[in-house]
């Protein structure tokens, strides 16, 4: 039997990933202390907080893992426990896939644990100009950080579901790239706080798992990395539709739901469950408050098709919540098209000129918050197929 060893593994994807790579018996092993680890296993993957502590339990440590100072893969070779580091390979593949250059760059690493040591080794091998650290125990304090870095990497679990914390606001940094080893949610608040290249740790997780199985079984599985990664993206990413009232978001979402066999969530329908929208909207602040509560309640959903109310984009927190696990698609319609649609049941559009006024006020906001802007179904299909491979 093969296991992922850690302290709290409720939200891990490792079992799913390893079983996608090969026909492996894989499960989770939660221990409060590393000293409780026996030898009744064939192999282990090791996660926070045991990547360094596990080394005290091993009979043999690969030279490269020893040099890094972190082990995340263990093989039980007829009672002899052998330790390896596949995180390095995973991080390398992640960086290569996203065309991030470390050579001669100024690197800030958040955290000083086992994953931090792996990233440090990679940065040094790639010829980083300098490497600084930020953590609670040592290095530079968050409040003392200056805007002098090219790449910032979060190696801590801060921001991992269900923790909604922001470890560092990147809006004040003119960086080239942000990397978060967290993969659940797909976009943490750390990544959402920057407009530059922002990369999560999912590809690294898949690549290091592939490398671990190569060590377990002495078989090459490199061809599985992109295949497994794309399957996971397809299974976990939400497709979120935003746009003007009467632009066809609900109709489009229903078609997508059928085509991709994903559950459809309509935020207006959820509000209807609380009370009639036509009645609630007479008290607009209350309506917006309820709408925000609904968005907050579904923010950690995965693999859904979500259609939203036209005004959902007016609250920045709504957008952050929807982007945690979703790509936002703006279903753009011309004002001429919208004028042809029925305004029945649309209290905010009953006054003459209200549609034109709303269109003018919101069009740029829709474009700004969207990951993609589309005009019809064919364009939506193209976006989704490109995103998922």
Image (tube, rainbow, N blue to C red):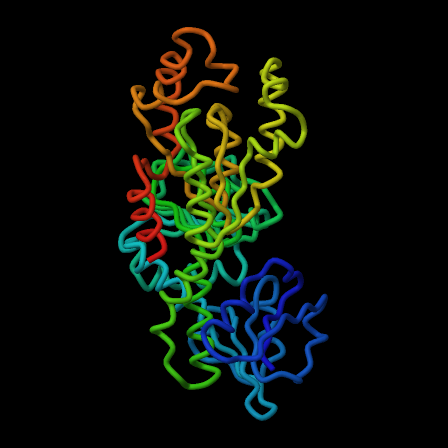
- Percent of width and height locating residue 327: 42, 43
Above or below for 264 versus 120: above
* Quadrant where the C terminus is found in the figure: bottom left
Q: Hey, which residue is sitting farthest top in the picture?
A: 352
Residue pictured at 38% horizontal, 72% vertical:
224
Q: Position of residue 127 (x, y in %)?
A: 29, 59
Q: Quadrant of residue 248?
A: top left
Q: Nearer the viewer, residue 169 or 312?
A: 312
Question: As rendered, which of 346 and 215 lies closer to the eye?
Answer: 346
Q: Quadrant of the N terminus?
A: bottom right
Q: Position of residue 385 (x, y in %)?
A: 33, 53
For image coordinates 61% across by 62% down, the residue present is 49
- Count of all numbered marks drawn on residues in the image: 0
Return the residue nearer the eye: 247 or 296.
247
Q: Is residue 169 above or below residue 311?
A: below
Q: Report the side of 220 relative to 271 (left or right).
A: left
Q: Residue at x 50, y 72 (%)?
A: 18
Query: What percent of the width, then of the height, locates residue 221?
Result: 38, 77
User: Which residue appears farthest toward the bottom when viewing the image?
Assistant: 78
Quadrant in the rendering for residue 363: top left
């Amino acid at each position: 039997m093969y296991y992922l060893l850690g302290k709290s593994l409720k939200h891990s994807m490792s079992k799913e990933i390893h079983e996608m790579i090969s026909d492996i018996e894989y499960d989770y092993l939660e221990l409060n202390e590393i000293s409780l680890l026996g030898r009744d296993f064939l192999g282990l993957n090791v996660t926070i907080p045991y990547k360094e502590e596990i080394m005290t339990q091993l009979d043999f440590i690969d030279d490269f893992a020893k040099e890094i100072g972190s082990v995340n893969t263990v093989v039980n070779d007829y009672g002899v426990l052998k330790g390896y580091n596949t995180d390095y390979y995973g991080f390398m593949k992640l960086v290569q896939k996203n065309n991030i250059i470390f050579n001669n760059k100024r690197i800030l690493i958040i955290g000083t644990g086992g994953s931090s040591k792996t990233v440090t080794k990679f940065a040094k091998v790639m010829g980083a100009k300098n490497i600084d650290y930020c953590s609670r125990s040592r290095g530079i304090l968050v409040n003392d950080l200056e805007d002098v870095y090219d790449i910032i990497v979060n190696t801590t679990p801060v921001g991992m579901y269900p923790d909604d914390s922001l470890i560092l606001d990147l809006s004040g940094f003119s960086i080239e790239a942000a990397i978060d080893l967290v993969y659940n949610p797909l976009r943490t608040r750390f990544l959402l706080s920057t407009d530059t290249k922002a990369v999560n740790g999912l590809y690294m997780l898949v690549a290091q798992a592939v490398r671990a199985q190569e060590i377990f079984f002495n078989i090459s599985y490199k061809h599985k990395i992109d295949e497994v990664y794309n399957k996971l993206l397809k299974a976990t990413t939400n497709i979120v539709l935003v746009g003007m009232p009467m632009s066809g978001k609900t109709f489009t979402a229903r078609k997508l739901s059928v085509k991709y066999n994903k559950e459809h969530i309509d935020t207006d329908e959820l509000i209807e469950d609380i009370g009639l929208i036509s009645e609630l909207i007479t008290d607009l602040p209350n309506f917006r408050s309820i709408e925000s509560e609904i968005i907050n309640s579904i923010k950690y959903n995965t693999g859904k098709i979500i259609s939203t109310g036209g005004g959902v984009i007016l609250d920045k927190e709504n957008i952050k919540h929807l982007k945690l696990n979703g790509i936002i698609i703006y279903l753009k319609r011309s004002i001429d098209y919208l004028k042809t649609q029925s305004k029945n049941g649309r209290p905010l559009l009953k006054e003459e000129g209200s549609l034109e006024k709303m269109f003018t006020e919101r069009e740029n906001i829709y474009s700004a918050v969207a990951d993609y802007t589309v005009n019809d179904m064919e364009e939506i299909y193209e976006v989704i197929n490109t995103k998922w491979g």
